[in-house]
Amino acid sequence: MRFSANGYYVERYVKCDCCGVLIYDEGIAVTHPTAGALLFCSPWCREWQTQKLAGVESPRIDTPYA
Amino acid sequence: MDYVTMNILDNTMLSICREMGIVLMKTSYSTIFNEALDFTCGIASPRGEMLSAAEFCPAQIGGLPLLIRSCLLEIPLSEIAPGDVLIHNDPYRGGLHTPEHTLFCPVFVGGELVAFTVAIGHVAEVGGMVPGGFAAEATEIFHEGIRVPPVKIKRRGEDVVEVWKLWLANVRTPRYNYGDMRAMISGVELGAQRLAAVVEKYGREVFTQTCSDLMDYAEKRMRAELAAFPDGVYHFVDYMDNDGVSDSEIRIEAHCHVQGNRLIVDYTGSSPQVRGPINATLGVAWSAAYNAVLHLTDPSIPKNSGCFRPIKIIAPRGTIVNVDYPAPEVGGNTEAHPRIAGAVIGALAQAAPQRAMAGEGGTHLNFVFGGHDPKHDEYFACYDIEVVGWGARAQADGNDATDSINGNCRVMPVEVFETRYPWLTEEYSLRADSGGAGRRRGGLGTKKIYRCLDAEITASQLTDRHQHQAYGLAGGLPGAAGMTWYQAHGRDAWQTMVEAFDKRSTSKWSNVTFKPGDRVQILTPGGGGYGAPAERDPALLEADVRDGFVSAEAARRDYGKTV
């Protein structure tokens, strides 16, 4: 989430490029060779999206969801 | 894990949540609270985990975790003091839709924050372009009423007067809104008193540890339920008719990945967000998935954040299931939610056919209106919910005339409706042949005819399933579509809103003026059937015909039987 300098209003609603949840911290930025710049809320989302972009239908990821 | 204390605390917290709800019901001003019970009360941990929730409105139970998350990320715990009450309705920050206001009251024991009591309620009037909060032709959030980010409405026991004045200046019915907000505050403050007494009795450490154990227990129970589903990826698609401002159907797609004792619900493939007001917020997307899973699993699992831990939801941003600012969203919570939950149920029905129900009516009808009351010289507004037929299951017919899957709300009694508002209810009946045929029949929708009395009324409606019917399962037929008709005073013909007022959609229209003598007829959709109609027990079909639920003609057409 990007707030104005004084915190009075939202300048941009920042969301995870996998699950769509709002990201209040810096998130996990990734540059994907085909999808470009991506931002994730968690290692799980980064891994899921990476595997989906690689064509895995149902990735099995052991890390916690968030 | 001390199961005895855990069980006692679980039920005690549930009782507190129920008592909060009863206070809210009994002290509120609007019929949406005191008749329809469109609210939920819960308890959350200081970390934002839901510890308990009363069984009022399922849409709001599933929405609690995201609402609390945004609130606590924007108002640090260090700034929260005894006597504070926080308010929040922003749909883009965890909220469900603009009318849904959430109040949080911190619970302090020995100077330490131990929990929050929470009330979420559907406030009937929130300003915006139509009275009653459902602007069916809205194309941006600013048409839908006032948005409140997480702020304090009480600080250390005192009203934050500026917030009250700002909020009440932006609604049509400030006296009612004031009363309803006081009712919600009373609910959370009473809950805070009750919970503080419980924590003092058991001690903070025991309370905190037991809550942690309780969530672990709920997680374990939910994982055991999910493990019973065969592993696989299950897929289902359902559609909404249109968004009220264009004619395109809207796709809701669910991919359910069952992986051992966990579940990933991925909505990828759903339509991009639309111009009209039926986009779902992320809170709705989460809530709908939880709602569907709770329908398919053991109802005795405690409803807390632990039971949601094994479920991951992927709701791509900028789609119908995760709207981006500033697109409108008010119908997402009432119309998209049931369709999303229905898609998840439809997908998981392939894994657990004995647990699933066929598609349900999937709309709250959302008939809203307002006007000037000359007797009291003030504005009135009403949000009226109607009921639908639910889907049939493997072992039973669908429920008749029941609020859609995410509401669990009551229909306002005719007597109350006529006392409070200038309408006469001329007919209210179950709708024959609306339940989808099947070995188990879909539940029936209803038929209602209102006549406008002695006031001009500005009415709107945001509903769905006028075109896309509730789906059948295992060979069952779909339920009947709904429809809304208008009859001008002194005329015989019934017209759709498209025919009578040149509206774009029969199901989504705004700011139509009803004059004395005008009538509106609302036909609500029925539920889908389960199993082949030819397999229905002839005795049950005969009883249906005798009761008027199925006509002799439909018995011949759909069941191939002469009764």
Image: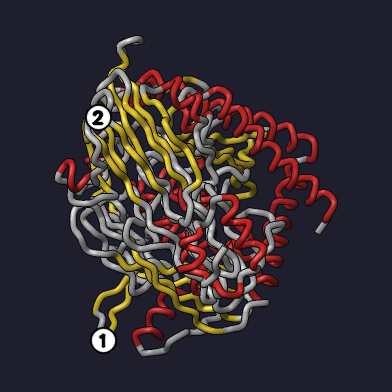
Q: Which residue is mark 1?
A: A33
Q: Quadrant of the N terminus of chain B?
A: bottom right
Label 1 environment density (alpha carbons within 10 Å; few <14, some 14–19, many ≥20): few
Q: Is residue B312 visible?
A: no
In the rendered image of this protein, does residue B510 appear above or below residue B332?
above
Residue B440: percent from left, percent from top:
60, 66
Q: Chain of mark 1?
A: A
Label 2 environment density (alpha carbons within 10 Å; few <14, some 14–19, many ≥20): many
Please identify, in this view, whether the residue under mark 1 or under mark 2 is nearer the observer.
2
Label 2: element kind: strand
In the rendered image of this protein, does residue B530 appear above or below residue B165?
below
For the residues beneath circles 1 and 2, the answer to whether they share a chain is no
- What amino acid is labelled 1 in the image? Pro
**Gap between marks 1 and 2, in whole Å?**
59 Å
> Residue B480 occupies which quadrant of the picture?
bottom left
- What amino acid is labelled 2 in the image? Phe
Q: Chain of mark 2?
A: B
Q: In front: B265, or B463?
A: B463
Q: In front: B332, or B77?
A: B332
Disc number for residue B514: 2
